[in-house]
Structures are given as structure tokens and as C-alpha cells.
Amino acid sequence: MGVIRTDQWLLKHYKTPLKITEKMEDYFEHAYADEIYAHLTQFGMYLPPLQKQRVRQLIKKQVWQTVEEDYQQLKRLWNGPSVPIFIFPSDTTNRKLKDDYNSKAGLTFKDKLFLFLSDTNTPNEIKALLTHEYNHACRLTNYSKEEADYTLLDTIILEGLAENAVRERLGEKYTAFYTSKYSDDMLNVFWEKHILPHNQLSKKSRKHHHILYGLQFYPFMMGYSVGNYLVKKYLEKHRATSQELLTLTSEKIAELDNVDIRG
């Protein structure tokens, strides 16, 4: 598959995003253009009005070529799945997205992934985002558990694998801000106090979401941060690479395979 030429869609339909998402209906089961667009905007896709100049800037920066070339490298490196990749401008009006991620975001399904980008993103930032999202696709393909059955532990390990893959390829500079937000001692407290007792929470649970993102009284981005910490600790202890962990159970990576982990 590889990169879908959404640049051509955007040049023609940038004012009418539903005409763009109509083209993606065949990639989703039982979803229509308006539902697809509503879902994608929750994860960072642009909101109207979109200036055509933003599209032209992304084209001028050869974003579609950069992503295609790096995707082919990753696919060979990780023996990864063939998936369609959709690139769209990001929502630059979203202050949180701008402040925390320099107006870039991604969304991955087992069989497709989306990148939402700004013309301020550098090639290495784009590669970091692709690395993170494509690592998700590789984990979802290689791990012997259906995503619908994921627990909180599975989710944080999924995220930890992706950020450690970015660290390996591009260095600490290009990892997400939350990877250096807390000390190891604090992360260990979060793990033992907040996450371990609830590690088997279904991803459908509201509390799963609260712990993952650090909502309500939980520390900000706690689940993501702890997932990165657990994977990094395992990699360092076993002198492994993130690719070697793609098939391992979440329990093994968290070193709980011989422990009663029922939350």
C-alpha cells in the first residue's frame, strides 16, 4: 500500500473535507464520510476553513515523498505490514496540540494509519511521528491479542514500544515531551500505586482512559509515561531492541509474567 496521494484530494476538495472522507469509506467498515471525519478531527485532523496555501506548503516540503521513503525503510527494517497511509493538514487552532506536539498528530488502526501535519514540522519530526504510528501497526499485527481485548497494561506497553522505537531511530530529542516529564522514582510510584492495581482494566473502561491520559486526579499523561518507562527498563536490562519486543506479551515486557496481575 504505502502513502495515498491525499495531496491530490486536498488540492481539489480542501474546502469540503466530507468529499475527502467519502473517498475513505471503503477503508472503514460500516462508517460514512461524516462519521469518519468526526472521528479523525478528534485526533488532530484540520477543521475548516483550510487555506489552500497550507496544502501547497506541505507539497512544497515534499511531505508525501518523505513519508513514503521512510515507510519503505521501516517496513524493511521491521518486516512490517503493508498499510495505507493518509496524510492531512493538522488542526493548527488546537493550542494543546501546538504546545505539546508542534501541531502534529497520528492515528493508527491495524490496517491503516493517519498522519496530521503542519508545515512547521521538520523532516525528522515527521519521521518520528511515522515511526511511532507504524510501530503501533507492527505491534497490532504481531501481538497475539485482538485490539478489542486490550487491557490498560497492553495499551501502555503499546505506547512505550512506539516511543522507544523513536528513541532508537532518531534519538532522545525526537521523543514525546512526556518521556522526560517525570523521574524514574516517580514513574515507579505511579506504576505501583496507580497502574499495577488496575492493569487489567478493559480499554473500553472510562478509568482506562483517565489513567492513560492522566485525567481527573491522575498525573498528566501518566499511562503513556509509565509505558515508556517500563519498555525502556526492559530494553536496557535485556539489551534488546524495540523490534524484538513486538511479539512479547505485555506481561513479559512489564516483567509480570510470573506474578498474579489481576487488578
Image: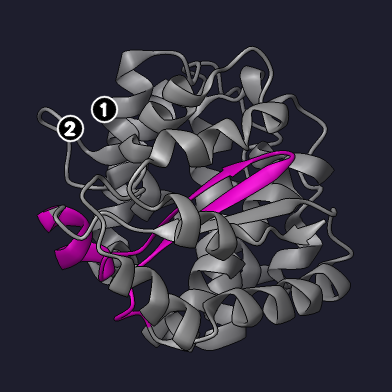
Q: What secondary structure is found at the residue carrying circle 1?
A: helix
**Is 106 one of the magenta-colored residues?**
yes
Quadrant of residue 109 within the rendered picture: top right
Quarter of the image for the N terminus: give it. bottom right
**Is 50 one of the magenta-colored residues?**
no
Earlier-in-chain disc, 2 versus 1: 1
Between 14 and 78, the one lying in front of the other is 14
Residue pictured at 69% horizontal, 79% vertical = 70
Q: What secondary structure is found at the residue carrying circle 2?
A: loop
Residue pictured at 16% horizontal, 43% vertical = 219
Q: Which residue is mark 1?
A: 210
Quadrant of residue 259 within the rendered picture: top right
Residue pictured at 55% horizontal, 54% vertical = 9
- Residue range highlighted in magenta: 95-121
- The x, y position of residue 163, in whole percent, is 50, 65
Eyeballing the image, is 49 above or below 57? above
Between 76 and 203, the one lying in front of the other is 76
- The x, y position of residue 152, in whole percent, is 48, 29
**Gap between marks 2 and 1 measured at Cα:** 5 Å
Q: Which residue is mark 2?
A: 215
Q: Are marks 2 and 1 in contact (CB under 8 Å)?
A: yes
From the viewer's perspective, tell me whether residue 171 is left or right of residue 238.
left
The mark total stands at 2
Eyeballing the image, is 98 above or below 152? below
Amino acid type of the residue tagged 1 in the rendering: His
